Amino acid sequence: LRDFLLVYNRMTELCFRHCVCNLNYRLLTGREESCLDSCAARLVRANHRLMGAYVGLVPAMLQRRAAEYGAAAGPPGLPA
C-alpha cells in the first residue's frame, strides 16, 4: 500500500507540474485536463508494463535464491 501511494503521489506531482501552468483559476482548462488525462494514462500503462515484467521475474529470482541457499548449505548431514 505504501509503494502504491508513493507511485500515485509521484505521478500526480509529475503530471501536475507538466500540465498545469496557470493557477489563477479554480477549475482546470480543457487543455490542462486533457494533458493530465494523457499524462496519467501514459504513466499507468508504463507502471502496468513494469509490474508485468516484475511478476514474470519473481519466480525465477526465488528459484535462484533457493538454489543458492541449498548450495551454500551443502549436502545434508555434513557440517557447513
Image: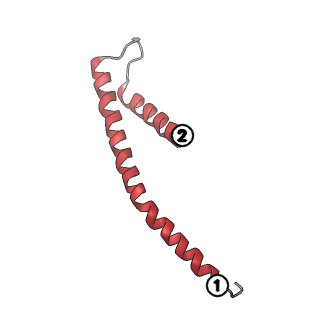
* Drawn side of residue 32 relative to residue 3, left or right: left
Tell me which amino acid carries mark 2. Answer: Leu
Report which residue position mark 2 lands on.
1
Give x and y (percent) for residue 6: 52, 39
Give x and y (percent) for residue 73: 64, 80
* Drawn side of residue 71 relative to residue 55, left or right: right
Secondary structure, mark 2, is loop
Q: Distance between the Cα atoms at labels 1 and 2?
A: 40 Å
Mark nearer the viewer, 1 or 2: 1
Tell me which amino acid carries mark 1. Answer: Pro
Report which residue position mark 1 lands on.
76
Q: Residue at x 41, y 12 (%)?
A: 24
- Quarter holding the C terminus is bottom right
- Circle 1 crowding by C-alpha within 10 Å: few under 14, some 14–19, many from 20: few
Q: In the picture, residue 22 is in which quadrant?
A: top left
Q: Residue at x 43, y 36 (%)?
A: 11
Secondary structure, mark 1, is loop
